[in-house]
Image (spheres, rainbow, N blue to C red):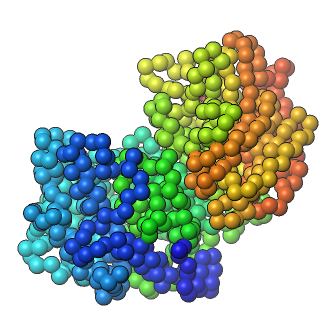
Amino acid sequence: MAFQIKHPDYHLSPYTGLTREGWIDAGKYMLEGIFQHIRSFDDPVVMPRRETEITYPHLKDSEENQHTQRLAEMFEGLTRSFFIAAPLIHIEPEITICGYKLRDYYKNQVLKSVTPGDASYIGTYEDQQEIIGHADPFRAFQQTVETCALVICLWLSREEIWDTCTKEEKDRIAVFLTSYAHASTVPQNWRLFNMLDLAFLHMEGYPIDRDIMRDHAQVILNYYAGDGWYRDGHSFDYYSCWAFNVYAPIWNLWYGYENEPYLAAKFEENSNRLMETYADFFDEDGFTMMWGRSNIYRNAATSAFDGNLFLKNSTVDPGLARRISSGSLMQFISRADFLWNGIPTLGFYGQFGPLVQGYSCAESPFWLGKAYLCLHLPADHPFWTAVENNGSWEKLQAKEVKETTLDGPALCFTNHKANGSTLLRTGKVVKQPGDIHGMWNYSKLMFHSKYPWEAAPTGEGEPGEVESMQYVIKDGTTGSLSRANVTFWAGESDGVLYRRQFFDYNLQTECHWMQAVNLADFPVPYGLIRADKFRFFRRPVSITLGALGFPDNGTEIIRRQEGAARAIILKGRDFTGKEKQLAMTIYDGWDDLKVLKSHGTNPDSEYSLVIFAKTARQKQYGYEPYILISQVITRESHEDFTAEEIFPIEKVEYADAQGCGGYGTVRILLKDGTARKVVFEGLEGHISL
């Protein structure tokens, strides 16, 4: 059964009705789903497993690796569920769920996990090296991630658990933590896990290597790209928010302010910079967008607001922070497909294999428990007492669009008052050729808060040749298909965002041999207009461009035409029965517009539809149309789009006499009297990765 708010308060929380009491109820709801599977007081938090092909423990691995993975799974279940339990234990020390007093259960499980010889003993870093049979100084283990969750939760429930431990028990925990804190880690956000382990040990009077701490911290600072965002590996994603901008503020509080004031000041400055624009990353309902890896963590993205509140000089708007945190929580917890057997699915809403990574296990979704950390704030904190407000959404006029462009992390997001949606366009993306999962997570031309990305459609007629919000190129000679795996960023100019994508890019082939497309797009009230220019190395080719994936639970398909422009409109409902509508319009450069049916590729619905445009270029060398103009718009109702909204373009003017857009400015005049100039010349000097 989906979670329902028992006592909504629309005076304090006019947008969601959710208060601190409601958050506590939501935490208990989640824990009840977990503890219905705990058969005895000594049983670890290991949940029923629905998926066995992608997630770990990997059944095809060696017995040694499987053993290590089973230990990691036990620890992951313990510490991530502890994210939800720890603040509740502090609020209600006697809290009991499914017959288990949480304070006693978690204390027992923590001690069992660090006690040699116990059936639930996780083992130190050195123990893991012995299990795999050799000492690899660069090997990192999943347990390092979870030790960080453990120390946060021990701190949150200090009086109820940590302070009730004997000195011998504390020392036992410290030996375990020290092992991972000082050992090898992954050279990206993982360094923060070691930093918090070290900071907790130092805070509790245990010796640490300060040089190791300082080395990790300076590297983390140097991942900073600007605008509050950190680069994690090659990518920008929510790890910047639920890792860097949560753990760094906690580190400041535990260690940095006192021992590393320069680094602490920079982490504080970066968090406050994120708060300047991060609220606009969510839509009018507070929805979190499906984007980047680890989407099974869902509303954990809102934990960056709570992270900011750990700082000495926090700048976040508490009423806005709670409104978004509550809206995103309800986005998921209020849906009937969110839980399977009482635990969050390995999906975004329901179970959805295409977004799951191999480093996850059945208990991994409990990372979303980081959103519950806001419950560490006392009842009289402004986060709980301020009246909810909706930030920019309260200031936007009926069809106004607010655009935020961040060149550091290469993110451009637009808030569309007309339909309450937030759209995201990204750059600085590098994925291996053939990494279709990475492309779905990062390389979509647009991510939408109300339309989670669609995997490759499975319908008949265009097998493999269509992707939602991606171009696919088919070689007319070999029949091979190419998808964009690298996206360069060129920034915004005069209201138009510029990027470049390469298809099947790899460093062994020179860039100018690649198929490439220069991207230019700009917002309209209900969506985006594209005016992209292809640069071909090989022809003949055919090209497709898919619209957003549309949930198909009974859909009306409508076709319209105005002059040479054509449109297809879809009217239907999502899994919850909410009305939805999507339209795709094609203009210059396109030959045809079709609809493809699919099954099992949409996170919101078992069946889905993808509108797609198609065209072909036949000559190896020849002056054929270069510019492809299209529009995708959506609304959350069945109220008809106007003719002007479906066909917004009055005229397209080309600088070249042939009207192909091979050179010079492309001027797009809209029926509302506005105009956009698309200029690709000079783009080469602005692209960045």
Quadrant of the image occupied by residue 497:
top right
Query: What x and y, as percent, mark residue 569?
Result: 80, 49
Left or right placement of residue 256 versus residue 513 in this view: left
Query: What residue sits 26% from the left and 67% below the top?
Result: 44
Query: What x and y, as percent, mark residue 330?
Result: 55, 71
Quadrant of the image occupied by residue 94:
bottom left
Above or below residue 41? Residue 92 is: below
Left or right placement of residue 130 versus residue 350 in this view: left
Q: Along the line of sight, which residue is nearer the eye, 443 or 217?
A: 443
Query: What residue sits 62% from the left and 41% below the top?
Result: 457
Above or below residue 472? Residue 309 is: below
Quadrant of the image occupied by residue 389:
bottom right
Q: Along the line of sight, which residue is nearer the eye, 120 or 10?
A: 120
Q: Along the line of sight, which residue is nearer the eye, 532 or 595?
A: 595
Query: What x and y, as percent, mark residue 407?
Result: 54, 44
Above or below residue 41? Residue 657 is: above
